[in-house]
Amino acid sequence: MARVILRKEVENLGEVGDVVEVKDGYALNYLIPRGLALHATASTVRATQHEQRIREAQVQAARRTAEEAAGKFQGVEVELAMKAGEDGRLFGSVTNRQIEEALAAQGLEVNRRRILLDEPIRRVGEYEVPIRLHAEVKTAIRVRVVAEEAPAEAAPQDEKAAAEGGEGAPEKAEEGA
């Protein structure tokens, strides 16, 4: 039997840093050549324990940073104006890329891959959108999707055309009668 330290997680054997006993052939022919394990000597055990402490410290530091960043996202609301039909369905959809850009405009930087949309938003309304800042730290923002207003110039012209057509039609009907 050989004692080895696992450098990577091995299914049904252990996790990174575990000292396990395996058959000599398994260690020499599979685990060690593939870089999955090292021989467990006193010096390699100490070195592995030291690496593990450093890794844990880095994970804790990243978690603290993510928790601080989560505070910045509390109460954040993003409003996106999109073209929509009368029934509230959007022409297109709101994606995590658009949310990322809207957050950047507010001075909040977040990678779009961390914005967790199950599927793109396709209707007008308010949505809670989760953001994963760290494996253990999540927060949420409110995204309000509103219908984009038609340009102000186009509306009066349409009204004039309708008014002209509306007035002209009865006159023509009277002329023909």
Image: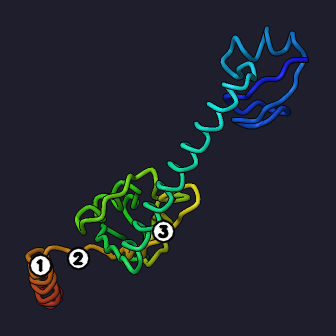
Marks counted in the figure total 3
Characterize the local packing of mark 1: few (<14), some (14-19) or many (20 or more) Cα atoms within 10 angstroms. Answer: few
Residue 113: image tag: none
Q: Where does residue 39 sit, x and y in percent of width and height?
A: 74, 18
Q: Is residue 89 left or right of residue 162?
A: right
Comparing marks 1 and 3, which lies closer to the viewer?
Answer: 3
Q: Which residue is mark 3?
A: 129
Q: CA distance from mark 1 to mark 3?
A: 32 Å
Comparing marks 2 and 3, which lies closer to the viewer?
Answer: 3
* The furthest residue to the front: 42
- Which is nearer the N-term, disc 2 or disc 3? 3
Given the image, on which type of amino acid does mark 3 rest? Val
**Helix, strand, or loop for circle 2?**
loop
Q: Quadrant of the C terminus?
A: bottom left
Residue appearing at x 48%, y 68% in the figure: 129
Q: CA distance from mark 2 to mark 3?
A: 24 Å
Q: Which residue is mark 2?
A: 149
Q: Is residue 149 left or right of residue 26?
A: left
